[in-house]
């Protein structure tokens, strides 16, 4: 129930339509319930007695009631549609905005494909259930109650046949719901896998074609599709019992009403009105009310099935909405940073929060403002983890990390990340022009500032050779530029922020050594006061750094100038000599 209340907050400005729909629906039901009574009067008091004036009067009343019912029905449907669409729009926004507030630790809990499914398929299921709730969930019970009252009013003894159908229907629906729900839950998890397979294939389609793995990808997709088909078929087979069960109850009641109603008409004596009998018009009305009652029960059964399907979606959406971010701004956040100095004071970090499984252990570093620091280490030595703590993408598990003399946890997070510009190991460009992508660093940047940043990143030369220069369209993910060009555009984007700290996480791996040296030279002249942290695989990329940090298994094993490390660190010397030897052999 708490989950439903939380989701209901997304109705917001569409509450008016959500409340209006049931009210209009009630007007439609009242008119529909009156129509059989009018029909009975036409038959019994008009046709049977030959009173054509009564037939004309009741006929006009019947037409009026039908039009009023139609009006209420159309307006109720319109209100429900607006409320349902508005609710889905707000719910998607709430989910998306919530995801934007997630820390990296929160995002790690959900796969990308799972979040996409929750924003699309799951929201659609909940929207359908909500729309049915404000329409059928009110219409069916009201119709059921009114129709039963009218049926009892016509003949209380004959209306007892409904007592036979209700227990059968109730037990059957309970069994269907209890068996179908676990299967639907499994189906939506399989949808996550399907989205993951499609996303991975589309993003890596060039690799797939290069290695001629289309058949393998087709088999992988077919396997997941068959899992969905199998589970959905199983669920639908269970749900399919709902139709025959309803038909059994409907036709069973119709047979009983026909049998006992005919006997009552005969007892009445040629259709004459009799308190203990029944007229032809009343039997005709009773048939209509039977259809209304059982139709209402059928609506309720379909609603139960829909709610069974949407229940799994509600749980999955609630998981995202209820996820508490692992990071939050302090009560009085700091919004001033005196410089770009960085200090790691016995910092340890674990992704899981388990101190027995640390990714970084007892890191102690003191980096002065404006320094250029190289970070070297083997694969899995936690180089990226180390720098991701600085803009507070993750929080330290133990120890203290300060920037500008202030603990990073005391800064306003938005302000901190504005001051720390990071070019991630996995570069990402967005669909838009070159200018659009660069202005992610500073949306108010002038054309001159954009060109200056591009020149510093050695990107201006190739951008000007593009068909439309800085107005050239970049495909999603930077598909129409090379890896080296993508890296240089991302560096230019980071420089536009004019940060106090610039972090390059292996961000020049796809450029040649000459271009790498030119970029580093530009850093010394263009941003001399910015603290620069450069994660690299090549010793040449950090040989002119003020200091080099050597990591191994999440620990600092050496930290000194490149010259001193060459003399005193066997590991650094081994890396440098092996790379120089490889370069000589390649020549």
Image (spheres, rainbow, N blue to C red):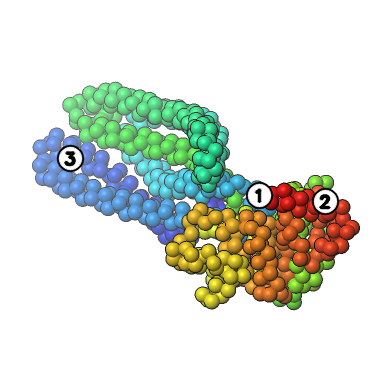
**Pointer 3 or 1: first along the chain:** 3
The residue wearing badge 3 is 42
Q: Is residue 450 above or below residue 505?
A: below
Q: Nearer the viewer, residue 205 or 290?
A: 205
User: Is residue 75 rendered to the left or right of residue 6?
Assistant: left
Q: Quadrant of residue 421?
A: bottom right
Q: Is residue 292 above or below residue 442?
A: above
User: Is residue 545 rendered to the left or right of residue 289?
Assistant: right
Picture coordinates of residue 30, whole percent (x, y): 32, 47
**CA separation in Å, label 3 and label 1:** 70 Å
Q: Quadrant of residue 544?
A: bottom right
Picture coordinates of residue 464, whole percent (x, y): 49, 67
Q: Nearer the viewer, mark 3 or mark 1?
A: 1
Q: Which residue is rendered at x = 14% and y = 34% of the image?
A: 48
Q: Which residue is rendered at x = 75% and y = 61% of the image?
A: 542
Q: Quadrant of residue 337?
A: bottom right
Q: Which residue is rendered at x = 21% and y = 31% of the image?
A: 280
User: Is residue 374 rendered to the left or right of residue 60?
Assistant: right
Q: Residues within 10 Å of mark 2 (few under 14, many from 20)?
A: few
The residue wearing badge 2 is 574
Asked which secondary structure carries label 3, the reply is: helix
**Pointer 2 or 3: first along the chain:** 3
Q: Pick out the residue farthest to the right.
A: 568
Q: Is residue 529 above or below residue 467?
A: below
The dot on residue 108 is 1
Q: Nearer the viewer, mark 2 or mark 1?
A: 2
Q: Answer whether residue 505 is visible to the viewer in this image.
A: yes
Q: Which residue is rendered at x = 39% and y = 42% of the image?
A: 140
Asked which secondary structure carries label 1, the reply is: helix
**Label 2–label 3 contact, CB within 8 A:** no
């Amino acid at each position: 129930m708490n989950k439903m209340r939380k989701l209901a907050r997304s109705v917001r400005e569409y509450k008016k339509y959500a409340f209006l729909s049931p009210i209009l629906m009630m007007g439609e039901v009242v008119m529909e319930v009156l129509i059989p009574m009018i029909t009975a009067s036409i038959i019994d008091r008009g046709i049977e007695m030959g009173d054509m004036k009564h037939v004309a009067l009741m006929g006009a009343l019947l037409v009026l009631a039908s039009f009023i019912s139609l009006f209420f029905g159309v307006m109720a449907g319109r209100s429900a549609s607006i409320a349902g669409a508005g609710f889905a729009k707000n719910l998607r926004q709430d989910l998306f905005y919530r995801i934007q507030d997630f820390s990296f630790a929160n995002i790690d809990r959900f796969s990308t494909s799972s979040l996409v499914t929750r924003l699309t398929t799951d929201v659609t299921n909940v929207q359908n259930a909500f729309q049915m709730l404000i329409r059928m969930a009110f219409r069916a019970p009201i119709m059921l109650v009114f129709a039963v009252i009218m049926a009892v009013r016509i003949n209380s003894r004959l209306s007892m046949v409904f007592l036979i159908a209700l227990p059968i229907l109730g037990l059957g629906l309970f069994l269907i719901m209890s068996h179908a729900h676990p299967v639907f839950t499994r189906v939506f998890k399989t949808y996550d896998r399907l989205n993951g397979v499609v996303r991975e294939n589309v993003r890596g389609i060039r690799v797939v074609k290069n290695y001629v793995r289309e058949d393998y990808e087709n088999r992988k997709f077919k396997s997941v599709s068959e899992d969905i088909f199998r589970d959905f078929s199983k669920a639908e087979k269970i749900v399919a019992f709902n139709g025959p069960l309803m038909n059994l109850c409907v036709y069973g009641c119709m047979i009983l009403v026909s049998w006992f109603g005919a006997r009552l008409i005969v007892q009445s004596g040629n259709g004459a009105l009799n308190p203990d009998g029944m007229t032809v018009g009343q039997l005709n009305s009773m048939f209509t009310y039977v259809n209304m009652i059982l139709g209402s029960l059928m609506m309720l059964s379909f609603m139960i099935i829909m709610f069974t399907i949407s229940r799994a979606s509600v749980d999955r959406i609630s998981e995202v909405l209820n996820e508490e971010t692992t990071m939050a701004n302090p009560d009085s956040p700091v919004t001033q940073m005196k410089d770009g100095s960085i200090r790691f004071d016995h910092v340890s970090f674990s992704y899981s929060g388990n101190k027995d499984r640390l990714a970084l252990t007892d890191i102690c570093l003191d980096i002065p403002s404006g320094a250029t620091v190289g970070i070297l280490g083997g694969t899995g030595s936690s180089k990226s983890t180390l720098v991701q703590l600085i803009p507070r993408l993750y929080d330290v598990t133990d120890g203290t990390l300060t920037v500008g003399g202030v603990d990073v946890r005391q800064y306003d997070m938005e302000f901190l990340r504005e001051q720390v510009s990071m070019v991630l190991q996995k570069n990402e460009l967005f669909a838009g022009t070159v200018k659009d992508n660069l202005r992610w660093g500073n949306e108010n940047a002038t054309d001159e500032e954009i060109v200056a940043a591009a020149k510093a990143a050695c990107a201006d030369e190739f951008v000007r050779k593009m068909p439309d220069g800085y107005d050239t369209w970049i495909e999603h993910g930077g598909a129409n530029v090379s890896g080296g060009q993508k890296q240089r555009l991302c560096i230019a984007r980071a420089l536009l922020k004019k940060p106090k700290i610039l972090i390059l996480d292996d961000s020049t791996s796809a450029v040649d050594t000459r271009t790498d040296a030119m970029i580093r030279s530009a850093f010394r002249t263009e941003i001399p006061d910015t603290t620069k942290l450069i994660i690299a695989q090549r010793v040449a990329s950090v040989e002119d750094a003020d200091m080099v940090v050597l990591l191994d298994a999440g620990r600092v094993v050496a930290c000194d100038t490149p010259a001193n490390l060459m003399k005193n660190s066997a590991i650094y010397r081994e890396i440098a000599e092996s790379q120089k030897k490889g370069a000589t052999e390649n020549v």
